[in-house]
Structure formats: structure tokens, C-alpha cells
Image: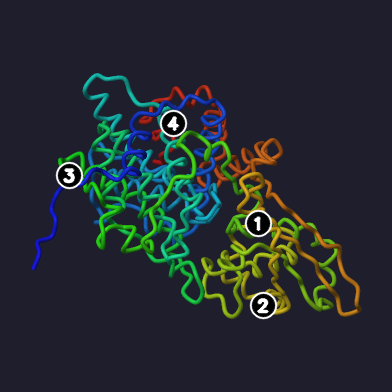
């Protein structure tokens, strides 16, 4: 019998590359920081809108009811003041609940602003300690720079590494990115950032079971909150003195590559900078899985031609890309709102019937309309290989869908094709004013009119908000 070699290896290069960037990179590109500002207010607005939904609200607050945390972190839109890890969970869950915050699509998918939970909680926790020590406070500008880094870590890892192909959920990238930036925000050095990232990979990955038929359910709405809070928890563990694991990725037999990634090494397609934030996708028009955004837009355009002829419809043809078919094309019963907002056919049917799509359209009372399932049964979904190729092409990154409706009298609507949704960088100038309108409306879901207007004025003012201390920022968003 031979003894197993126990020489400590060098750190995996990927761990070092992430740590060098998270700890040492200076984010000074104005486009990236201004887009981060839009991402932040949009994410918070999505969280405010989620507070209208009891299934989200029931998950918020202290783990043990009645627990009070002196000097804790205020959770925006609520009266909760929590320990940083639970605050990160609550903020992340609110942001993600309605599937309405920003998106990144590549070999892997995800929502980079899911990291806002850990970033805000870590920044607020660090700010309290800095202020107590007489040091300059952390500001919202620091939060925006951290957001650029979290977006970049999550998004560049997603460019060429497909975790969904091995059955893992993309929230593992939220955990990795949150661990890296939270450790840096909390004052960790480069080696501590690297150690925290190693722990994030050691956690493995959640299964995608809860995102796919026949098991789609509301866990997908809090999974990112869980991941971002776990990233912060790992940061705090490392800062308490826990060592890292140098070959967490590459260790033969026991490392992430061999255990969970079919033995393939993880790669970074491009150097870490600000590419992802500058090219991130915003959900402006519809709270729906992003692969269906252009299908919803096309169906809304067809609504005037179809709404008065619903009973005459013979079939609906949706032409789409491979990722949409794999993720959100489904037949049969839909069991809950989370199931419905991940169904391409349901989304198109609602848009054709109602001429729009809101979060309320996934609720049971709307889903009881028998015309919805009738239209779903008449929907044919096909792949266009060109759409699939352009989806992955860095020069395009399109998310194309086309919709056409055929009637029993052999007539049809026009075929409406949309390559880029409203929140795509190709339509950025068109989308930004509407994104701000979305934020304004979402503030009114929580705050009285006068306060909502005051918050809107403050939070949409980029120069003013970047200079605001994090503690003051979160204080303005708390409710009595």
C-alpha cells in the first residue's frame, strides 16, 4: 500500500485571478459605474415590488422570531434590522423573487445583481465598524464598484462554463462572486479573498431541479438570496481565521473539476474588467424569464390582431433558440407562479390575450382562465439554428423569438420577429428612461406617494447617491 501524497499544492490559478481582481482592481470606467447605478436601483425596485407578495414576505425577518440585533442591517422596504448574513438573504430574496432584475446570458445564465444582498450587507457592516474607528465611511460609490466586480466575476465565468449542462444551478456563481467581493469590502486582504473563494467552490452547487418541469417551484425565487448570504457567511468565516483550500478546483478525485464538472477545468474567456456590467441585460417590459422576453414583446404586438379572434385560433408558432427550448418550453399542468413564469407558452398566451404581462398574471386567479391552457395546447415551438448561433455569438448576444398566429379560416397574422429585448445593450438608449419609470412605479408599491417621490429624486441622482454613506442610504429605505 502506498501513502497518499500530502504536499500542499499551489493555489489554483483561477482562485488567484479572482482574488487579485476582487481585492486589487480599481473600477473607474464611468459607463460601468453608471450602469451599476441603474442595476442597483432596478434591483431594489424589484425588491420593493416583491413585498406585495406574501410568499416572499413570509421568508423575511430574523430566523428566530423576536430576535433583535443591535447595530444590525436595515432591510430596504421593511422594518427589519438583521444580522448581516440574514439581511443578505432577505435583500437577495426580495431582488430575485419576481424574476425581474438584470440578466446575463451565455454558456451559463444568471442574474448578476443577485449579489446585491451580500454587497449591501457587507458594506453596511464594514461601514459601521469604520465609523466606530473614526475612519471614512463606505459610500454607495463603493457599493457600485463592488457590483461591477461581482457582475464581472459571475458573468465572465458564465461565458464558457456551462454548469447547467452538468445539472448545477447558476446560483453557485452568485456564491463565488459574493464571497470574493464581500471579503474585500470587509477589509480582507488578497489571500483572505482567495481563501473565501476556495470555500465557495468547495460548497459545490445546488441542483437545477427546482427550475425544471416537473419540479419547478418557488425555491428558484430564494435560491439566489441563499447563495449571496452564503457568500457573505464564508467571508466572515475566513476573516475569523479559517484557512483556504489551494486546490479546491483541481484536486484529483476530490476537487470541483473532477467531482462536479466532468473533469474539465474552469476557464475565464477574457481578463476580468468591466465587460459584464457594461453589457448586462435589463428586464424592463416584463417580469419573465429572460429567454421569453422577446416572445412576450412579439405577442404583445400581435394582441390587437388576435384579442377579438381567440376562439378562431388554429395554432400559434413560436420560433426560438435552443436555450429557451431547454429551459422554459413545457406542456402539461403548471402548478404555481414559479412554474408559470418559466413557461414560454404561458407567457406568450398571456401577452396575446391581455396585451401585456405583469407579475400578477402568474397568480392562480389569472391562470384559471381556460383560454390560457387552450392557447398553450395550440402552441408549436421550433428552434431556428440562426437564433441559437447568434445567442452565443459575442458580436450579437441576441435573444431572438418570433411569433405568428394562424386562424381556422386559413388566414394568419404577420410574423413578428424580435432579436433584442428592450433591456439589451443594443437598445440601451431606448431602455434607460423606461427602466427609471419601472423603478419609480416600484417605489410606489411600498412607500406613500410623497416619500416615494423623495426617494426617487435622491436615488436616481447619480452624483448625489454615489457620495452617500452606505448607512444613510439603507436608512432612507427603511420603513417605520
Which of the two discs, 3 and 2, sits closer to the camera? 3
Tell me residue 296's x, y (percent).
69, 59
Q: Which residue is mark 1?
A: 389
CA separation in Å, label 2 and label 1: 31 Å
Q: Which residue is mark 4?
A: 145
Q: Which residue is mark 2?
A: 373
CA separation in Å, label 3 and label 4: 27 Å
Q: The N terminus is located in which quarter? A: bottom left
Image quadrant assignment for residue 203: bottom left
Tell me residue 298's x, y (percent).
75, 58
Query: Looking at the image, is mark 1 or mark 3 earlier in the sequence?
Result: 3
Query: Looking at the image, is mark 3 or mark 4 earlier in the sequence?
Result: 4
The residue at 22%/24% (across/down) is 132
Query: Height in image: 137 above or below 69?
Result: above
Query: Looking at the image, is mark 4 or mark 1 earlier in the sequence?
Result: 4
CA separation in Å, label 4 and label 1: 33 Å
Image quadrant assignment for residue 291: bottom right
Which of the two discs, 4 and 1, sits closer to the camera? 1
Q: Are marks 1 and 3 in contact (CB under 8 Å)?
A: no
Mark 4 Cα shell of 10 Å, populated few (<14), some (14-19), many (≥20): many
Instruction: Judge left or right: residue 375 versus residue 1.
Output: right
Most distant residue in the front direction: 1
Q: The C terminus is located in which quarter? A: top left
Mark 3 Cα shell of 10 Å, populated few (<14), some (14-19), many (≥20): some
Mark 1 Cα shell of 10 Å, populated few (<14), some (14-19), many (≥20): some
Amino acid at each position: 500500500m502506498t501513502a497518499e501524497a500530502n504536499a500542499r499544492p499551489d493555489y489554483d490559478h483561477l482562485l488567484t485571478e479572482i482574488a487579485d481582481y476582487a481585492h486589487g482592481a480599481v473600477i473607474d470606467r464611468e459607463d460601468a459605474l453608471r450602469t451599476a447605478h441603474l442595476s442597483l436601483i432596478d434591483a431594489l425596485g424589484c425588491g420593493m415590488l416583491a413585498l406585495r407578495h406574501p410568499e416572499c414576505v413570509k421568508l423575511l425577518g430574523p430566523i428566530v422570531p423576536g430576535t433583535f440585533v443591535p447595530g444590525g442591517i436595515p432591510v430596504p422596504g421593511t422594518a427589519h434590522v438583521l444580522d448581516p448574513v440574514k439581511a443578505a438573504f432577505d435583500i437577495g430574496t426580495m431582488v430575485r423573487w419576481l424574476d425581474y432584475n438584470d440578466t446575463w446570458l451565455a454558456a451559463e445564465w444568471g442574474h448578476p445583481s443577485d449579489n446585491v444582498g451580500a454587497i449591501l450587507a457587507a458594506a453596511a457592516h464594514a461601514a459601521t465598524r469604520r465609523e466606530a474607528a473614526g475612519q471614512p465611511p463606505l459610500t454607495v460609490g463603493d457599493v457600485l464598484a463592488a457590483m461591477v466586480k461581482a457582475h464581472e466575476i459571475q458573468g465572465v465565468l458564465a461565458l464558457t462554463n456551462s454548469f447547467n449542462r452538468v445539472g448545477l444551478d447558476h446560483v453557485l456563481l452568485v456564491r463565488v462572486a459574493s464571497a470574493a467581493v464581500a471579503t474585500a469590502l470587509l477589509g480582507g486582504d488578497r489571500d483572505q479573498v482567495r481563501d473565501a473563494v476556495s470555500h465557495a467552490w468547495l460548497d459545490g452547487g445546488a441542483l437545477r431541479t427546482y427550475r425544471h418541469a416537473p419540479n419547478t417551484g418557488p425555491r428558484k425565487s430564494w435560491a439566489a438570496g441563499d447563495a449571496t448570504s452564503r457568500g457573505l457567511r464564508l467571508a466572515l468565516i475566513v476573516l475569523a481565521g479559517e484557512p483556504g483550500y489551494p486546490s479546491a478546483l483541481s484536486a484529483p478525485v476530490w476537487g470541483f473539476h473532477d467531482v462536479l464538472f466532468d473533469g474539465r477545468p474552469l476557464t475565464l474567456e477574457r481578463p476580468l474588467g468591466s465587460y459584464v456590467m457594461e453589457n448586462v441585460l435589463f428586464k424592463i417590459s416584463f417580469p419573465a424569464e429572460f429567454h421569453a422576453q422577446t416572445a412576450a414583446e412579439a405577442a404583445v404586438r400581435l394582441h390587437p390582431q388576435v384579442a377579438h379572434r381567440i376562439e378562431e385560433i388554429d395554432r400559434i408558432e413560436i420560433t426560438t433558440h435552443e436555450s429557451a427550448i431547454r429551459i422554459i418550453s413545457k406542456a402539461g399542468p403548471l402548478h404555481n407562479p414559479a412554474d408559470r413564469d418559466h413557461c414560454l407558452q404561458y407567457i406568450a398566451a398571456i401577452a396575446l390575450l391581455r396585451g401585456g404581462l405583469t407579475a400578477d398574471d402568474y397568480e392562480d386567479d389569472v391562470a384559471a382562465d381556460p383560454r390560457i391552457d387552450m392557447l398553450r395546447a395550440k402552441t408549436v415551438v421550433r428552434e431556428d439554428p440562426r437564433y441559437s448561433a447568434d445567442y452565443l455569438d459575442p458580436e450579437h448576444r441576441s435573444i431572438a423569438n418570433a411569433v405568428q398566429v394562424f386562424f381556422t379560416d386559413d388566414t394568419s397574422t404577420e410574423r413578428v420577429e424580435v432579436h433584442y429585448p428592450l433591456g439589451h445593450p443594443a437598445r440601451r438608449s431606448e431602455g434607460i428612461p423606461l427602466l427609471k419609470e419601472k423603478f419609480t412605479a416600484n417605489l410606489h408599491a411600498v412607500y406613500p406617494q410623497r416619500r416615494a417621490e423623495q426617494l426617487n429624486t435622491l436615488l436616481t441622482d447619480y452624483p448625489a447617491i454615489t457620495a452617500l454613506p452606505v448607512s444613510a442610504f439603507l436608512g432612507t429605505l427603511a420603513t417605520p
